[in-house]
Amino acid sequence: MTDFDDTAIERFSTDGFLKIEEAFPRETGERAGALIWERLGLSPDRPQEWTRPVVWLEPSWDGALGEVMHGPRLAAALDLVAGKDRWVPRPVVGMMPIRFPHPEDSGDTGWHIDQNIPGPDGAWGVVTGRSHTFLLLLLFSEVGPDDAPTRIRVGSHRDVARVLEPYGEGGLPFFDSGPILDAATAHRPEALATGSPGDAYICHPFLVHAAQRHRGTRPRFMSQVPMSLRSPLSPGGSTPLDRLTWPC
């Protein structure tokens, strides 16, 4: 699909994220949702069994969960933001935090950016300006304002670039970075990653975001996908992703 233009690039530049409606067919997203119910061992008709605020499911390439990563519209959007042949195709979606209506906070709702480079021991746990990844959110259910949509601090990617610059390529340990980035971006307006099955959000790796408690009536099905880059972000790069990485 080729209906993306300079307006989409401008939105990504300003906001730090781009919503892609019908990044993959709604029907595929609904079938993916049915597979998620099977993997959970739960039913949409038995809410009394939804006893936890969040259940994390491992990545899967089963059926529709594999199909969503191969759609031409999603690929065109990733090309637009990250550059053609710059991002690494994935055969599988990412981790799936399934959030259920529940009165308790799940304890994982702090503001942060995702780990984006392996640490000295090869394990992930560091955030740095030389990010090797960017974030993709895929929706497999209807997600309204009360359905635990991901919270986004609009434009926060620009603040984070400035905050991370003094730390160089070594970056910050992930759990140390959260309070620092929260304080640096608290002035930013908030948006919600709402939408329908098949919608996607492409997020700059510096976009500060957070989960929240589910206040609706139906679980939220979503996958958060770390998209790998063939080379880390660079101040000399020509893609929208690169151009937004450095303080301006």
Image: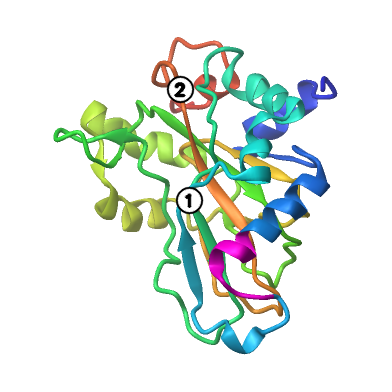
In the displayed structure, would residue 48 be above or below residue 227? Answer: below
Does residue 13 appear anywhere in the picture? yes
In the displayed structure, would residue 245 be above or below residue 160? Answer: above
Does residue 149 appear anywhere in the picture? no
- In this view, the mark in front (2 or 1): 1
| Observer-nearest of 124 and 210 | 124
> Of label 2 and label 1, which has the lower sequence position?
1
Quarter in which the N terminus is drawn: top right
In the displayed structure, would residue 126 be above or below residue 246? Answer: below
User: What residue type is disc 1 on?
Assistant: Met
Picture quadrant where residue 74 is located: top right
| Observer-nearest of 45 and 223 | 45
Q: In x, y percent, where is residue 157?
A: 50, 39
State which region is magenta: 36-43
Question: What's the distance in space between the residues labelled 2 and 1, CA to CA?
Answer: 18 Å
User: What residue type is disc 2 on?
Assistant: Leu
- As for residue 39 lying within the magenta part, the answer is yes
Instruction: Point out which mark residue 95 bears.
Output: 1
Q: In x, y percent, where is residue 65?
A: 63, 45
Farthest residue to the left: give it.
Answer: 121
Residue occupied by mark 2: 229
Q: In x, y percent, where is residue 142?
A: 76, 61
- As for residue 104 lying within the magenta part, the answer is no
Name the chief secondary structure element in magenta.
helix
